[in-house]
Image: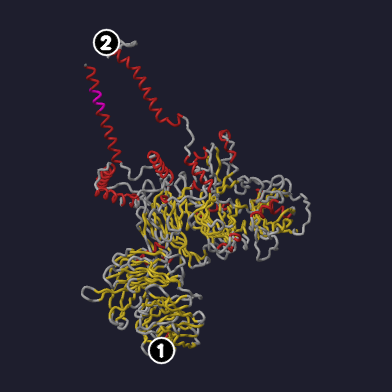
Amino acid sequence: MAMAIRVFLLSLLFLSFADHSFSLYEDQAGLMDWHQQYIGKVKHAVFHTQKTGKKRVVVSTEENVLASLDLRHGQIFWRRVLGANDAIDGVDIVLGKYVITLSSEGSILRAWSLPDGQMVWESFLQGSKPSKSLLSVPINLTVDKDNVILVFGKGCLHAVSSIDGVVLWKKDFSAESIEVQQIIQPLGNDKIYVVGFVGSSQFDVYQINAKNGELIKHASAAFPDGFLGEVLSVSSDMLVSLDSTKSILVTINFQNGEISFKKTHISDFVEDHSGIADILPSKLSGVFAVKINTLLVFIRVTAEGVLEVVDKINNAAAVSDALSFSEGQQAFALVEHVDGKVLLTLKCSHDWNNDLLKESVEVGHQRGLVHKVFINNYIRTDRSYGFRALIVMEDHSLLLLQQGATVWSREEGLASIVDVTVSELPVEKAGVSVAKVEQNLFEWLKGHILKLKGTLMLASSEDIAAIQGMRLKSSEKSKMTRDHNGFRKLLIVLTRAGKLYALHTGDGRVVWSLLLPSLRKSGSCEHPNGLRIYQWQVPHHHAMDENPSVLVVGRCGPNSDASAVLSFVDTYTGKELNSLGLVHSVAQIIPLPFTDSTEQRLHLLVDTDKHAHLYPRTSEAINIFQREFSNIYWYSVEADNGIIRGHVLNRNCIGEVVDEFCFDSRELWSIVFPSESEKIIATVTRKLNEVVHTQAKVVADQDVTYKYISKNLLFVATATPKASGEIGTATPEEASLVVYLIDTVTGRILHRMAHYGSQGPVHAVFSENWVVYHYFNLRAHRYEMSVIEIYDQSRADNRDVWKLVFGKHNLTSPISLFSRPEVIVKSQSYYFTHSVKTIAVTSTAKGITSKQLLIGTIGDQVLALDKRYLDPRRSVNPTQAEREEGIIPLTDSLPIIPQSYVTHALKVENLRGIVTVPAKLESTTLAFAYGVDLFLTRMAPSRTYDSLTEDFSYALLLITIVALIAAIFVTWVLSERKELQDKWR
Amino acid sequence: MGVTTKEKDLRLGFSVLGFPAYSLALQLCFQTEFRYSESDQDSKIQFSLEHAFGDSDFSPAGIFNARLKTWNHGAQTLTKLRFSRNDFTEVEKEKFQNLLKGDDFYRIRLPSNVLISPGPGREYVISSVKARCLPRESLDEHFVIHMEGVNILAVNYGAPGACPHPRQLKLPAKWSFKSHTVLKNSEQAPRAPVFSEEILGETAEGEVVPPPERSFWAKYWMYLIPLGLIVMNAITQAMNMPEEQGGGQAQQPGAVQRGPTPAVRRR
């Protein structure tokens, strides 16, 4: 019996090795992978420094993250990532122990424990009408000894208990047509004022009893000029707003239920006032700031409601809220940019000319302008007040400034990566100094002796720690040169802020960063956003001395018809080489498979008018392009109309200006999906740079099938419009999902297949000759994954060896897509437990290594699944030959093996994409997953069959060899001697 | 719009003509005459094929006639498609020859819905082929019309066979069309396999069953080879042994000779 168990365990062990080729040991974590945690661009920040203990700041961000940061070092104490539709509108701290967040447009209020981020309570606030959502925590307002949180959201005012989140009372404003702007709770008063506009020209005030929510008084007054924009409360009974022309400041006094307006022309304050004025939303108590073009005007409101200008500051960047730091003293921060430095000024609200603090801090010019500032005070050792400021920069980074220096900074731009590409590192220059070599040699020897000790189990615990430390931060993997195996590369990432970062794949550090000048807000480009990065110049062969560069394509505005901007960036130095502001828009970018003599890749930019523009704009490029002119086809997907069109180049553009780099296109084919029954929900193509090792696939019984490998295949999934929403909104009878394989040159539908009773979201990946896609099966109430493999039948006759010998095969004949395709398609479906955020596939240098699917699960992890599980040739009982080929017996669901999580114990919060990059070593691929966090690992889908593992002990091997050689010599000498003795005997 | 209501209906519907259940394929030439009985639910419809030469505008090129069959569950499908192709006029011939010379595209289009005559708002489905692919004996063309009820999703147009690259300039011997038309409907995707408990148990047991018996050699080769080596070694040793004995005898005459000594070795 014991024997049987032992055998069983052994076989289990063996199976675990055979199946999950990616699992790793505990001490290997962090060896080949790195993980970085971010939070995103900060929207709100609340400091918690009053009590002794850990000084922290609680922030909420645009990535819907709530985090508590250490004020000393900027590390994350805890972090909670809310869902994508759960944007945080307000954050505050109550009772000194709970963090309160209001999210989902004012409908979810949550309390989190301040020390550890555990959720304490959560309450769903009901409401009917979408409205502004406001969170306010009055300082001294209690109902039955319970601190009250006032929340306005969805047209209702709620008073919520801060202890357990129970709604104490509720006042519904949805019946009234008021658009609530502010909730004002004067100090030491049981009244709440709810103010807002009815239409655009009536102002209403509701006075409410804070104890029970009863309406005390309602007053309204008409303002015929109309309001525009927000109101700002200046004091407890005074509001400021702008009229509809944005040229008159309106002060609203609503004391004692009497509403009075007072108009002041902005031109009274500012001579030659032109342009639009805006009131900054900073709460400054008694003072408010108006921004007119670049000028910031601070205006004080006296008790009588008279406005007087306090100061005018040009080019101010940001203003913080007022902070009361001692008895009746209030201060706020003003940030300006002076000579490339950030000038932080702390002003006292009541005594304008007295600056509490004036510091100039160098923050680095690659961070852009200051967008937000939050301040906090502390008491210095000499009992005076000190201030620290948390600033949010244009590139989304977060910095803490204190005593004229940057205490810490966080590169939060990396939480919002838009696109990723890869660049090789420079080749190592010959000629390394001898001292360095000696140093290296000594280190090398020491390291290997330590490793040897570890292998021979002689190492003490300190030695083991030293070995582990050495493995984790081996200098080898973070070098700035190309390595033999191609593991070291630069990841060039474009973030939403328009900043480029180069991350080293070895340890994930930022090698350089560049806030692209062309993607910054300017007069000609109002709302720039980065779209994609492409490899512009990848020098190899004859242009080795050139640095590689990338092309960043952006757009001046949210719509696709906005004009495009191009930027070319050197990937070694991180300098912008050139930038172009284009006159045309950009709808599609097509990297062409041609390069010029300096290895610049030709790119075709298609604008919204279906004109194609060639870049680079050189005569050499146009010559290369003309040669391939008739072979360039592309397609466009109009998802809204349900049309896919194919295009071909026609002739040069006809316009007023002769532009030889601009070409007309003509429509070659179109596919029109009936709008009442099909809606395009996903389109996927193969990666352009994918390498396929062989077209032939040897199947069981020495048979050969030929993969249909075409770069011009498009996978399209359509769903019934009813069923293209959330899961559960459609019944199985009315939902269906149709998938297509379309040839994008001729518009042929090569395969079309319907999944009845299924719906999206569809996540798909296309590689070689197969597509794997993930969707929801409404009938089975489960997620499913399907695979489609497409095989070429026109080459199927080439099996005969004699045909190959006598050259009667058609393997070398050119393929024309205008021929009628002879393809067969195989398909199979399986259940899959998880819902999926994204799917990618591993890619290797030569395409020999078997593939794994990288599935970004709903738990923000990356799961590696062997492609062998998604093989349409799987059957319940594979034959012996099929088993030998590696076909797994068919099961109804795909296995999720815990060891095959690539991210092991880590999470990539808000996972958005996975990028795989082939290393030079065939067996290995780099997988980079990004979301709010970043994660990079090195994977070997079929194990590292072509190299020794990193912790292989060369010393042991050497010693063994030396020992063997010595033994050979010794035995040889001995035997010689013995033989001699024998002979003399 | 639903061919989707019940799978059974769908099967019934398409197997009426005796064709495979899902891909309703009508291979017919335009000259062939069909006779069919009139039925109340069926109605005749026709829609036109239009063509364009290179960049020119589209002009009528032929008429598709079909019967619109309405099934009990409300779905409508096209059956009995007939195509009458207009021959090229002289002008069109000339245009086509220009296309052949320039290796340009011959384009065709169909309305995206067979019931609604295409107006400004309605879309056409377009397909095109290099003109040099078409000419053989006559002009051979092949239409694959992808249908979804009464909607035409796409039409794939081209030569019925291969169109070898590089395309040679070749004029057709006969300026008449030989058309083949295939109607295609969506096929159903394979379902995820469903195993009943029984089968699961069986497979689970199947795993326990030892793998099939391998041959003796396949099982024990790793032992046999060293064994063979040892045996061979032993044999050579045994062969050499007498030699050594012989050599020894030369020095020790008193010893008993145990085997024949072929040669006395001198050192």
Asked if A484 appears above or below A928 in the picture, the reply is above
Badge 2 amino acid: Ala
Mark 2 falls within which chain?
A: B
Is residue A71 something that shows in the picture? yes
Callout 2 touching callout 1 (CB < 8 Å): no
Q: Circle 1 is placed at which residue position?
A: A255
The location of residue A776, given as percent across then percent down, is: 53, 57
Asked if A740 appears above or below A266 in the picture, the reply is above
Q: Residues within 10 Å of mark 1 (few under 14, many from 20)?
A: few
The location of residue B204, given as percent across then percent down, is: 49, 44
Magenta stretch contains residue A449: no
SS for tag 2? loop
Q: CA distance from mark 2 to mark 1?
A: 137 Å
In the rendered image, the quadrant that contains the C terminus of chain A is top left
Residue extent of the magenta highlight? A971-977
The location of residue A926, given as percent across then percent down, is: 41, 51
Q: Nearer the viewer, residue A896 or A641?
A: A896
Instruction: Name the disc covering residue B255, or none.
Output: 2
Residue at 48% x, 42% y: name it.
Answer: B207
Asked if A953 appears above or below B89 in the picture, the reply is above
Q: Residues within 10 Å of mark 2 (few under 14, many from 20)?
A: few
